[in-house]
Image (cartoon, rainbow, N blue to C red):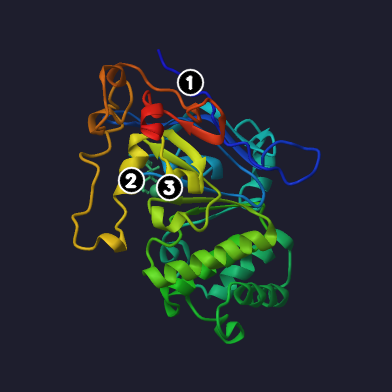
Amino acid sequence: MTIMDKTADIPAPRAGGSDDSPLLEVRDLHVEFHTRDGVAKAVNGVNYSVDSGETLAVLGESGSGKSVTAQAIMGILDMPPGKIPQGQILYRGQDMLTMSYEERRKIRGQKIAMIFQDALSSLNPVLSVGYQLGEMFRVHQGLSKKQAKAKAIELMERVKIPAAKQRVNDYPHQFSGGMRQRIMIAMALALEPDLIIADEPTTALDVTVQAQVMDLLKELQTEFNMGLILITHDLGVVADVADKIAVMYAGRIVETAPVHELYKRPAHPYTRGLLDSIPRLDQKGQELYAIKGLPPNLLKIPSGCAFNPRCPKAEDICRTEIPALVPVSEQDGSELPGRGSACHFWKETIHG
Ligand SMILES: Nc1ncnc2c1ncn2[C@@H]1O[C@H](COP(=O)(O)OP(=O)(O)OP(=O)(O)O)[C@@H](O)[C@H]1O
Ligand SMILES: [Mg+2]
């Protein structure tokens, strides 16, 4: 028997208006890949939502299904081998998985834009950045070449590329990694989307540049009141940027929480392990903690809680029963809004 995760999702503050559907809501999403070796269950019942002006960070080790979930939202999954056997992806309350092609096309790419990790492979090396930025306006808004170029320069200035007017005809390789990532952000912003999905947008950059690019993204998000889904495996990046966090493991959300609460009091041993693995300046010289073992093979996810073989707290029930994502409360039973954990022993973990 499979247990459907009950959504313990975070009730987000809504940005006015009578329509109370979140900007984007993923409901019980499943994605599998049919490969020669078998069926890889990459996403196994994910629920999350994000509102205008809000940042959701999606966190988890490599292979936990963060990008596949994003690809399903964007409609860029490889199908086949990918398949969505179950689930809904609601944009302002409307399921994109059952919409007509035409309706979907208007949302994806225009209302929802994506920023990838690797700007160099996302930009065309033989076209100038001005041309590529301008293309958005020529294709989608029917602007002339000259108008499009002016828009491109405006966008480059928006993302703080110095001497934008002079550099508009330069090619991607002539820009530094940080500047290229700014161009990717400009590209995503071009059509004034409601939601940006940023998949490891700064992973390829060095730490100082990472912070600058994150600051820029955050600033633009606030200015345009966009929703932001920030995918990362770097807990350090998240603290200053996100409002709430969803932690993924083996294709499931195992914990949700407002950002600072997650750092203070994790309610899942996996989250605790991730937090303990962050290098700390005040503990120089000490050996860094690492969660033992590796994430599971998705062709053969362990029975019960997928984390059980690596969990220091695992008991018999963890090997037989999949824990549902349930609301987490204070010891006296009072509510902890937005908090959820998929651990049989969440009480011991958070209060113990
Ligand atoms: N086209 C595909 N065919 C087969 N398997 C795939 C395909 N795309 C993704 N997968 C599998 O789905 C699983 C989840 O991948 P995903 O890219 O979502 O991980 P992730 O959480 O984004 O990890 P990372 O932090 O490394 O980016 C992986 O095991 C991956 O091998
Ligand atoms: Mg990924």
Few, some or many C-alpha atoms within 10 Å of disc 1 (few <14, some 14-19, many ≥20)? some
Instruction: Estimate the x, y position of residue 246 in percent, counting from the top left.
Output: 47, 41
The answer to which quarter of the image holds residue 67 is top left
Q: Check the image and report above or below for 290 versus 334.
A: below
3 or 2: tag closer to the N-terminus: 3
Q: Which residue is mark 3?
A: 263
Give the residue displayed 40% in from the left and 28% down from the top.
346
Q: Does residue 170 appear to the left or right of 16 in the view shown?
A: left
Number of the label disc, if any, that sits on residue 185: none
Callout 3, which amino acid?
Tyr
Callout 2, which amino acid?
Leu
2 or 1: tag closer to the N-terminus: 1
Callout 1, which amino acid?
Met
The answer to which quarter of the image holds residue 306 is top left
Instruction: Pick the residue in front: 25 or 126.
Output: 25
Q: SS of the residue at dot 1? A: loop
Q: Which residue is mark 2?
A: 274
Instruction: Estimate the x, y position of residue 81 in percent, counting from the top left.
Output: 40, 35
Q: CA distance from mark 3 to mark 2?
A: 10 Å
Q: CA distance from mark 3 to mark 1?
A: 27 Å
Q: SS of the residue at dot 3? A: helix
Q: Does residue 113 appear to the left or right of 341 in the view shown?
A: right
Answer yes or no: is residue 292 visible.
Answer: yes
Instruction: Estimate the x, y position of residue 283 in percent, counting from the top left.
Output: 26, 60
